[in-house]
Every structure is written in C-alpha cells, then in structure tokens.
Image: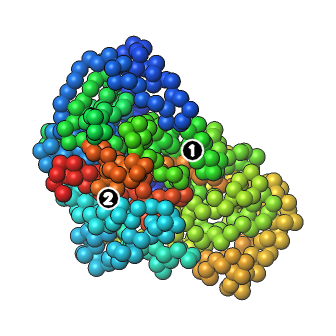
C-alpha cells in the first residue's frame, strides 16, 4: 500500500490520532525578569504541589476584569469558551501553548439525537453505574450522572455548530456480543467524520512529511476543535495563547475571584466576577511527577503520548485554593508500546507503537508463563505484569493472526477490522485501524528489532530472552485449552480461544502508551472543586483531566470515549452553572 493510501486509511480510522500528541502546546516564553514571586514559587516546600507566592510579591503590569476566566484550551476549555461566547458571557480564555488543543476522536455519551436515528440506546442507569464498578466505589456517582444526563445534548449541540463545516456525526453501534470477556460493553461511542477537499488533503500530507503517521495527518487537517473555536471567535470570544496560569486569587471568604497569569509582558491580574474554570489537563508530561504520584503506572510505560505542557499546574493551583486531589492515582494507558526484549520499561521510554498489544492473544511473562485471562480492558494485562519479572509481558501470535483478530472483535481504538456501522447517509464511519496500517506497524517493529519472529517456539523463546522449555509447555497447554473450547486456567471466552499452530510465530513485549492522568481535583456534580471537608469552593470549577471524582486506578476502556464525553459535558455545564443558567 502506498503512503497516501495508508495515511488516508489511518486518518479515517482515527485510531492512531485518538492517542496522538497535543496540538501546539509549547509553553509560552516570557521576557519578565526574575522577581520575588518567582523566587517564592521556586521554594516549593515538602509537598509535591509546593506553595503559592504571596500576592504582593507579583510585579503586576496590568489588571483586567471579566466575568469568567477559563484556564486551558483543550477539549474542556474549547467547549467552555464556545459556550460562554454563545451565552454572551464576558470570558477570557488563556492557554500557555501557542494554539488550542483538540477534542479527541471518540465522544462517549448516551441519549443523543443520532441514538434515536439508529434505534440503539443503552440503559442510562447501566452506563452511569459502570464507573462505580470500575473504581470499586472510589468515585462520585453524582458526577457520573451529570455526564450521563447531559452528554447526549452536549454532543448534539456540537453537531449543530459543526454541521455546515463538513463534520458528520456518527454513532458506533457495533459492540459485538455486548461483552469483552466478562466485561460488559455499551454502545456509547460517538464521533465526527470530516469531509475534506483534495486541496486540504494535499496540504495536510505535505505538512505530515514522510513520517507516514496518520496522527500527523490528523493534526494537519481542521477538525471539530477548529470549527468550535472558529464559532467561539465569531461570537466574540477573547482567547489568549502563550499566557500561563500562575495561581488563583481568593477573597476573605475563600471564594475564588480571579487569577494571576503570565504572558510575554509579565504578570497580570485578571478578576473574574463569576469565577474561574480550570481546564489545564493532568500531570502526565512531567515524568518525575508521574513517577512520584503514580509509580505503579509509571513503571509500565513504553511510549509517551503525553500532552506536552501538562505538568499539573492547574491541579496545584486548585490545591493552593483549598481543593483536594483524588487519592488514588490513575493513568489512561493502552497496551500498545512494543519494546525490545532487553529494554526496560518506564522513563525514558524506548518503545514503538503497535496495535497488536491490545489484542487478546496469549500473554506470557519473561519466565514463559501465561499470566491472566487476556480478554479484559486493554490496560489490565499491563497491571498484571507488575507481578512478573521486570514488569514485562509478551504477546504471542502466529500466521493466522488476522482471522484471530476478526474473532476477537475488539472495540474503540483497539479495533483493527473496519466496522460495518455507517453514517446516517449510509457511508462507512471509518472506524477501525485496518490491517494495512496494522501490518505496517508490525513490519516497522520487526525492522527495529523490537518485534521478534521465528519458525519455532524454541527460536522465538531465545529471541524473547525466556526459557524455551517453559514457553513451549505454556503454548502446548494453551493450545489444548483452545481445542477443548474451555479455558479452565483463566476463563477466557471460547471465541477468543484460538490455538497458535502456524509459523511464523511472532512475539513482542508490550508496555503502555502513556496518554494522560485522570486523577485531578475532586469535584461535585456541577464541576465545583471540593475541599477536604467535601464543600464546594465558591467560584472555582475544574473540568477534563484537571478534574477527578470519576476514576480510580484505571481507565474504563470498554466505555469507549467516556473521558472525552465527560470533558465536553462538564466544559459546557460548568460555564452555565457559573453564570447562573442552571
């Protein structure tokens, strides 16, 4: 397949782009000189979040007034900005990057208009209670309820804005049997497929260069994020890039009244009469902080897909104002980082992306032992691997892997076989990476010496640095279970019990794609930041990955797009609540 066909197929699939890097997030440079405030902020104290500087230590160059200050312009900030502009609220949006971020490929919601068109709708109560199950109760179901009750309407609102710009809403209704292993799967995955002219495609391909990466292509094309920001600007939005949140301001009662920010001119005070919305993302771009706060997840990373610049500053600012962060750290990660047998996991990351890691093939550790039921949320084998040498687990497949993948029927951005679901006009929705793109990743991994291939198990074991006798015994046992149609060792479902019999045999160790942290500030059902006493802080909201209260330990990967659905829902809800419209 030629490069143009590969890039276009990957673009339509959206799978690589879903985990792609942030757009334009280089931190803004400042010409301001060293000040008492900077010295104070540098003296961080003992806690990871440090201490704020005294407000009188800032050498302010300006003071401004607004109704609402939105800090951060990723998915939540974009929706908040468009909502404020539409409602005629005088808002200022700042972002320390050179441009806005993006709304990711999948938007997980329930109850949109397109659900009615397809006549498919999961139970709102079933979906609402899934976060409670995934987190063992360490979440706030009232937060989940806001997402469930308002997510569909938020998606419809976005669809109406972008409809005349060539963005077509889709609803992925195919969830196979409704289970992945013993885990239920609900049809909540929504998104947009954009139409582009040949000129736009040619320009984007030129910008993407020779990388052959659909994510680069995706970033070079306009999308829903661009269209929403265009809409906000048309409505009068005031958006300022290369402007960084420094810390919040509060009155004597503790209510947040604005913030100190910093741009190329220096420190400025922005007073916000209706409050501040924190939409600054998580802390995944700071490897040291990730290792400190979430060592269990940091040690399994193999590729960084982190949003550059997301260093936890908004979470710190919220803590300084009296808020608290989720106690249980949570990293969104997928098992797609193929890594060489002799390479360690963790920072500095040494892996290479390959979608085979999310498929439920046989998983073995460095002793050659099978470690778990492979049919599970796609990150779970990574966590199980922390009970094995070097935290490493290898995936093994044979020449029949395409037939096996079709039988596995994985979903969301793990899907490789294109879906048969369509847009309302009958066109394919483009969901699914395609075997062409997948095979290119495998070939690249083999060429780099990361993915190993052999004609015999003994040879493959040698290349994977594991005992040949142990691996051979494991595969023999696994094949026996497959032939019997019952996994009496770990309980894998029959359609995923497929024997490994046909050379070449291929294997690779997989770590995680480090995507984003989702253990942010605790919030209530309106997005208001909570204190340690579980009381809302007046005038302070957090949305997106800067907020918490919905996740604990792992991301509910089989609720496709739920984090993005939550983010856009609360981006809109927080603005309306702050403005007294709810």
The crowd level at tag 2 (other Cα within 10 Å; few <14, some 14-19, many 20+) is some
Closest to the observer: 331 or 169? 331
Residue in view at x 80 percent, y 75 percent: 476
Give the residue furthest to the bottom.
484
Asked whether 147 or 581 is in front, the reply is: 581
Q: Which residue is mark 2?
A: 525
> In the displayed image of the protein, which residue is found farthest to the left?
88
Identify which residue is drawn at 83% across, 68% down.
472
Q: Is residue 491 above or below residue 58?
A: below
- In this rendering, position of residue 416 left or right of residue 119: right
Residue at 69% over, 59% down: 385
Can you name the residue that lies furthest to the top here? 33
Q: Hey, which quadrant is residue 100 in on the image?
A: top left
Residues at marks 1 and 2, CA–CA distance in whole angstroms: 25 Å
Rendered location of residue 228, percent (x, y): 24, 48
Mark 2 element type: loop
Residue 50 visible in rendering: yes
Residue position marked by numbered label 1 in the rendering: 293
Vertical arrangement, residue 332 with respect to residue 208, above or below? below
Q: How many marks?
A: 2
Q: From the viewer's perspective, is 355 left or right of 233?
A: right
């Amino acid at each position: 397949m030629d490069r143009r066909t590969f890039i276009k197929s990957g673009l339509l699939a959206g799978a690589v782009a879903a985990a792609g890097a942030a757009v334009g997030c280089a931190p803004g440079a400042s010409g301001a000189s060293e000040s008492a405030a900077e010295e104070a902020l540098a003296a961080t104290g003992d806690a990871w979040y440090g201490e704020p500087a005294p407000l009188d230590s800032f050498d302010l160059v300006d003071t401004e007034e607004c109704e609402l200050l939105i800090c951060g312009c990723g998915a939540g900030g974009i929706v908040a900005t468009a909502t404020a502009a539409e409602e005629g609220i005088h808002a200022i949006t700042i972002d320390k990057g050179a441009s806005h971020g993006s709304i990711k490929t999948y938007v997980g919601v329930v109850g949109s208009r397109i659900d009615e068109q397809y006549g498919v709708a999961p139970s709102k109560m079933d979906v609402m209670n899934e976060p409670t199950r995934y987190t063992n109760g360490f979440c706030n179901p009232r937060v989940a309820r806001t997402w469930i009750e308002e997510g569909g309407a938020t998606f419809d609102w976005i669809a109406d804005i972008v409809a005349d710009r060539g963005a077509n809403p889709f609803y992925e209704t195919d969830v196979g049997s409704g289970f992945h292993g013993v885990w239920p799967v609900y049809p909540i995955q929504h998104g947009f497929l954009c139409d582009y002219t040949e000129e736009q495609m040619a320009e984007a391909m030129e910008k993407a260069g020779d990388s052959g990466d659909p994510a680069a292509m995706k970033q070079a094309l306009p999308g829903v994020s661009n269209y929403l920001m265009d809409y906000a600007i048309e409505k009068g939005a005031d958006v300022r890039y290369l402007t960084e949140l420094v810390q919040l301001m509060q009155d004597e009662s503790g209510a947040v009244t604005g913030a100190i920010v910093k741009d190329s001119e220096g420190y400025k005070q922005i007073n916000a009469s209706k409050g501040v919305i924190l939409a600054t993302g998580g802390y995944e771009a700071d490897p040291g902080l990730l290792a400190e706060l979430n060592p269990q997840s940091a040690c399994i990373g193999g590729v960084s897909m982190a949003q550059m610049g997301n260093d936890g500053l908004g979470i710190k600012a919220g803590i300084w104002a009296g808020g608290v962060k989720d106690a249980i750290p949570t990293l969104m990660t997928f098992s797609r980082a193929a890594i060489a047998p002799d390479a360690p996991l963790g920072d500095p990351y040494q892996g290479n992306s390959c979608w085979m890691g999310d498929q439920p093939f046989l998983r073995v550790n460095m002793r050659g032992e099978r470690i778990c039921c492979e049919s599970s949320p796609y990150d779970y084998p990574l966590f199980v691997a922390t009970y094995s040498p070097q935290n490493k687990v290898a995936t093994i497949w044979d020449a029949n892997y395409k037939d096996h993948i079709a039988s596995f029927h994985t979903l969301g951005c793990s899907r490789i076989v294109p879906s048969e679901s369509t847009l309302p006009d009958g066109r394919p929705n483009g969901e699914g990476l395609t075997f062409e793109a997948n095979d290119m990743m495998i070939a690249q991994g083999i060429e780099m010496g990361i993915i190993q291939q052999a004609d015999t198990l003994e040879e493959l074991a040698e290349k994977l640095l594991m005992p040949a006798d142990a691996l051979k015994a494991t595969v023999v046992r696994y094949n026996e279970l497959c032939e019997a149609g019952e996994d009496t060792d770990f309980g894998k479902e029959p359609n995923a019990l497929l024997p490994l019999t046909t050379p070449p045999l291929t294997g690779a160790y997989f770590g995680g794609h480090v995507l984003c942290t989702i253990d942010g500030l605790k919030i209530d059902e309106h997005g208001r930041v909570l204190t340690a006493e579980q009381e809302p802080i007046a005038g302070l909201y957090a949305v997106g990955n800067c907020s918490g209260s919905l996740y604990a330990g792992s991301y509910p990967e089989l609720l496709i797009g739920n984090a993005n659905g939550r983010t856009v829902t609360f981006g809109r809800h927080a603005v309306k609540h702050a403005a007294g419209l709810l």
